[in-house]
Image (spheres, grey):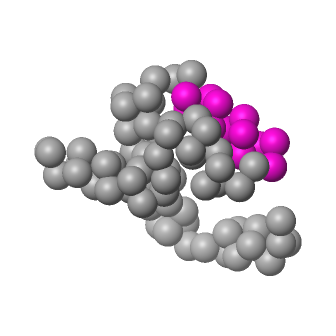
Amino acid sequence: GDHRDLHSFRTLRSSDRQIMDSQSARLILYMYTQWGPGSVVELLQRAGAGEDIATALDGSLGVNAQQLFQGRYQADQGG
């Protein structure tokens, strides 16, 4: 990865990091609820092994990023 990405993350305000942490936690909870813990672990393992996110999502959850975020949004809206 690009070291500038990590540097940018460290310079975010604490409140911005808290929002990112909250959103990340909600997304992981959504994936856990929809696909189960094994699929979440598989997604993280694939990403950690260097797979691009599109391939990792498709291989572990069977969805693309747009479908994932639309589903999470609908779940947040109660639908």
**On the rendered structure, is 39 left or right of 77?**
right
Q: Which residue corresponds to the image point at 67% horizontal and 69% vertical from the top-left?
A: 9
Q: Main secondary structure of the magenta part?
A: helix
- Residue 43 falls in image quadrant: top right
- Out of 64 and 38, give the one closest to the viewer: 64
For residue 14, above or below residue 40: below
Q: Position of residue 27 (x, y in %)?
A: 43, 46
Q: How many numbered tags mark residues here?
A: 0
Visible in this render: residue 49? yes
For residue 54, above or below residue 13: above
Image quarter where the C terminus lies is: top left
Visible in this render: residue 18? no
Q: Position of residue 35 (x, y in %)?
A: 43, 29
**On the rendered structure, is 37 left or right of 6?**
left
Q: Which residue corresponds to the image point at 65% horizontal and 49% vertical from the top-left?
A: 55
Q: Position of residue 36 (x, y in %)?
A: 46, 23
- Out of 18 and 27, give the one closest to the viewer: 27
**On the rendered structure, is 21 left or right of 47?**
left
What span is colored magenta in the figure?
39-50
- Residue 12 falls in image quadrant: bottom right
Q: Position of residue 14 (x, y in %)?
A: 54, 66
Image quarter where the N terminus lies is: bottom right
- Out of 41 and 58, give the one closest to the viewer: 58
Q: Which residue corresponds to the image point at 56% horizontal and 44% vertical from the top-left?
A: 58
Magenta segment: does it hold 10?
A: no
Q: Which residue corresponds to the image point at 75% horizontal and 49% vertical from the top-left?
A: 51
- Out of 76 and 62, give the one closest to the viewer: 62
